[in-house]
Amino acid sequence: IRFAEVVVVVFDSMIPFEKQDLQIVDLIAREGRAPVIAFNKWDLVEDRQERLADLHERTARLLPQIRGVRAVPVSGETGYGLDRLMEEIVATHKVWNRRVATARLNKWLDAVAQHHPPPAVSGRRIKLKYITQAKTRPPGFVLSCSRPDALPASYLRYLTNALREDFDLPGVPVRLMLRSPDNPFAGKAKRRR
């Protein structure tokens, strides 16, 4: 997992989402890799449409940390779905490598902050200054704000989910680091008149 770019996790479509499966997908996300789920033994499934809808719903509910992860039904015995699996791997890899322009990010930040402003902590409003993409593989963003240590985790999740939604980053881990802007006057003595 540490040396991979895209990791295919094979679930048994008869008994998916066992605890160990979910822990492996979580490890993949924490390592910053892009997971793709393959539901194997699809040739044994009877009501395929209903089963696929159920699997997609459970994937979204049980794996919220990588919202939008691609899941493909496959059959190792018949070869069903392997072409589609390869297409999803390539598409996920493109998302994992995606770069967003800083100007677009800052327009987005203004709109998001107006729609849902950051909360006031201890009576002082947190100001969101600017955002830039620091890296790809996985997409990592740096948000400059006043008092980054006071920004609640729930607001950080809101920003991460909005980034994922608005810039089409489904199924890959999105990193959002906070930092406080440099104070140009720090360390300088006040001038006396």
Image: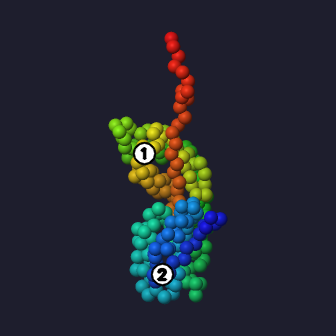
Sequence-first tag of 1 and 2: 2
Q: Secondary structure at mark 2?
A: loop
Tell me which colouring the rendered structure shows. rainbow
**Residue 147 against residue 41 in the figure, above or below:** above
Q: Which residue is mark 2?
A: 13
How far apart marks 1 and 2 lie (CA) works out to 40 Å
* Residue projecting furthest to the right: 3
Q: Would you say the residues marked 1 and 2 are in contact, meaning their CB atoms lie under 8 Å apart?
A: no
Mark 2 nearby-residue class (10 Å; few <14, some 14–19, many ≥20): many
| Residue positioned 41% across, 71% down in the render | 57
| Residue positioned 48% across, 40% down in the render | 145
Depth check, mark 1 against mark 2: the one in front is 1
Q: Secondary structure at mark 1?
A: loop
Q: How many marks?
A: 2
Amino acid at circle 2: Ser
Which disc number belongs to residue 151?
A: 1
Horizontal and vertical percent position of residue 80: 56, 83
Is residue 105 or residue 62 the one in the foreground? 62
Using residue 57 as the reference point, say whether residue 69 is left or right of it.
Answer: right
Quadrant for the N terminus in the image: bottom right
| Residue positioned 58% across, 74% down in the render | 85
Residue 4: quarter of image: bottom right
Horizontal and vertical percent position of residue 87: 59, 71
Using residue 76 as the reference point, say whether residue 13 is left or right of it.
Answer: left
**Residue 143 against residue 45 in the figure, above or below:** above
Amino acid at circle 1: Leu
| Residue positioned 55% across, 73% down in the render | 9
Residue 188: quarter of image: top right
